[in-house]
Image: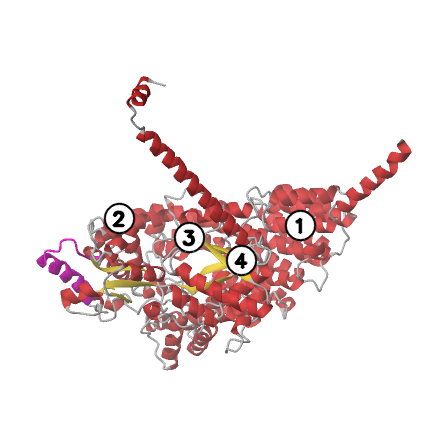
Amino acid sequence: MLMRALPLVLCLSAATLLAQEPPAELLGRAWTEYGLQAFSNADGLFAQVAESERASQEERWQARMGRAFITHYQMPGRDPQAAISQYEALLQEVDERDLWRGQILGRLADCYMEIVPAQVDKARSLYEQALSALPDDSPLVQETMLRLLSSYLQRPDSEEIALGLQSAAEMAPRFVGTPFASVFHGMRAEMAFFIGDYSALADALDAQYRAGISNVRVKEVVLFRLARINEVALGHYDRAEAYYRLLASEVPSSQKAHFATLRADELKNGQLDSDYAPPLSTRVEDRMVKEKPDGR
Amino acid sequence: MDAEEKTRAESGLFDWSRLSNYVAIVVLVISFSVSLWRVYRVQEVEQSDQVATIRVVHWQLEAGFREAFDDIARRFERVYLEETGQPVRVVQNAISERVYKQYVQTQGIGRSLPDLVQLGREEAGSVPRFFISNTEDVQKPNPYNRGTDLEDVPWMDTYMDGMVGSVDQADLEYYGAASSTLSIRMFYNRELLQAAFGLDEPPSNYRAFLDLCRRFGEWAQREGRADLMAVAASQFQASVFRSMRAATLLDLILENDRDFDGFFGGNDEVLLAYAAGDFDFYDERIRADQMTVANLTKYFSPGFMAMDRMEAQFRFTQGKALFCASGSWDAMSFNSQVDFPMGICDFPYPDSSDPEFGQYVRGRVSEANAPAVFRLAVSKFSEHPDIALRFLQFLTSRENNQRFNHLSRWPPVIKGAQSHPLMQPFVRKPEGFWSGDVHRVVGNGPATAAFSQANWELVEHKIDYDGFAQMMEDEMPRALAQEFERLLNTEWEERLAQEMALSHQLAGYAFGKTWGTDQPVPERVQSKMIYLWEMRMRRYRNSYRLLEWDKLLEEGAPKAREIQQHIKIDLKRKQS
């Protein structure tokens, strides 16, 4: 009887195994659910892979990483403090120099930035470790550097923000020609604006524009800011005219395109006091008064 | 048998009440059977194996819209048959706007959404769950533009707005395609205008228009027509008439635009400028902005703010009012309901020659950013997603977009598509400037509530402008303090929400290769990460705000100190 039943049991077991979804597919589905913010669905799928005997060690590790992401990022209920221990446990199981190790160190650093009060120095140290771990050719290197830079914007402290600008200057060569170059210069622009350095602000925004901006609304804002800073704060009217014209031609759907064309024409004709904007002559006088004591 | 029935039986009288019951039952049975038969027939047609059926659901119940849609659907059926040899049927179902959101949500959860669904009333974040992205398709030319100058132009670039309205903010992919756009204009009764003033068109000058409204009331009184009014309006129309404001705030905006992005209003700059004493509500430019509409509401019917929108429109279509205002979506309905010659015109904006506001007017407000509307997206539960997409491409080719909007009397959305003559006044006017909500820091906060209250009193002429300004000045310190707190929290939360979206892309980048059939395209993951970072950069401004706030307090700015008294949270503990 037992001998007769055995093949049947084996067949049924094999059929059950075959009917199960491969772990790779389960992981794909789990991350899709995660992206849709269906966290309980995602967690269930990650748990299946984490406990599956058919899954490889790497797949099980990834599933645990997914569960740590859920702890860290799910909304409502995100808990970066609780995610720290999960990430630290995962860190024990990856190689020294690896994309995945860099990924965990980066997320761990994020946790220290997000807990209240933030541990900014600890986070910066972890970002540095992540940068050492990541393969040099990975775009995550630039992404992690952006996170490191953003840590200088965490506190309302002008000196710290100025340090961030210095740090950005050191990082600049590593962004040249990379897809994140535009974002990097945008971050520099924010720092310069926070401490009122309009010259650095114009320089950073120009670099942001030249590096290429994918979002048309961001491009609209960057070109308008460049035109206005050059016109109003720096007195570089020829540059202001050029940026106004770029705005009108590259973002014709902007509500500001008409104004940009009119103002560019006025500046071309040497008309400082616009028919469409507050007069510039008083600002020019103010600037001259401010500049005289320094002898500039 | 009771005594009454026994008596009736003995007397031989017929029981008529019982007969009416039988008749009611028979009518009910017949009606039910006919309904069943019709449902069966519809299902038989829709479920026929021979014909692929594309079901479309939307909420556009305006006159002429469904007929226009049917016309395009029939044309598509013919073209598709010619192209493929396969028959197809497009069936539309218009659902009331009141229940539309619930319908989409429940059908989505039940996995039974129709093939094409109008977007715009769904739950936030539900689009990627229920609909198929067409990001790849919008970057390729629309095949139905073949033979035109748009033949090689990516589908997205054939749109006047570059199709930016089709990008879902949850996952940054394109979903669906819009077919029309909209604008707001004024409708007028040409017959009454002729009778009262011998004019075919109302004056385009703001002051002349106000004077005409005043004189119309006098004329109606002389004629004994107490039922007539100059402007048919409700609270809805009062907000619609705000479109007649000129760009009187532009100087104020540019003066207080600290980050030079051209925006002032609905952001932190309002708080900082107000607290610094750089502007207040006695500012003549705000007065001009507010009084442009308040001057007109004198000619609205008494109690208009409590009136229903439809009631006001009904008064106009019944010939009881000289003017009304609404959007392009109502033009066809108005046109089919009125039995008098109706005109449509742009608002009479104040211009630079205006004796009261002229010195602040920089021009009209631009309509360059008019939104694209009637966006249909392909549902994930569609049995024929390829045909549904093909229908969308057909509907938004230049030729068919023009035809569809010509028939429905809506403004087209594709470059070069011509409007119906009735829609000519609705053609958007990109030339112009911009305005801003200079009374608020965040949306739907206490400052907006204070503004709405003061504005209500102003447009109903219970207070004058100085009264409005005083109400605002009284409320703003408390309201701005609350909005400041909310802004600090919101930025933090919004950045964390973006962090979640970014974390998904980071996972895709690191692990995507192992996801089997769900493997993402690395280039797409990278471009989404960059897009998210571009949006995220300006969400680190809390530290800047707190720095500026400290400066204002140190300088001893009186209004900053007043606002500070209402702040309940510990700002020192706030971080970016």
> Mark 1: which amino acid?
Arg
Residues at badges 2 and 3 in contact (C-beta under 8 Å)? no
For the N terminus of chain B, the image quarter is: top left
| Residue of label 4 | B54
Q: Residue at x 73, y 55 (%)?
A: B514
Give residue B549's mark.
3
Q: Amino acid at mark 4?
A: Ile
Q: Nearer the viewer, mark 2 or mark 4?
A: 4
Residue extent of the magenta highlight:
B208-231
Is B276 left or right of B320, judged from the image as shown?
A: right
Q: Is residue B227 left or right of residue B154?
A: left
**Location of mark 2 (residue):** B307
> Which amino acid type corresponds to the residue marked 2 in the rendered image?
Met
Q: Is the residue at mark 1 from the same chain as the one at mark 4? A: no
- The subunit letter for the residue under badge 3 reads B
From mark 1 to mark 4, how far is it between C-alphas?
Answer: 28 Å
Q: CA distance from mark 2 to mark 3?
A: 43 Å
- Quickly name the residue at label 1: A29
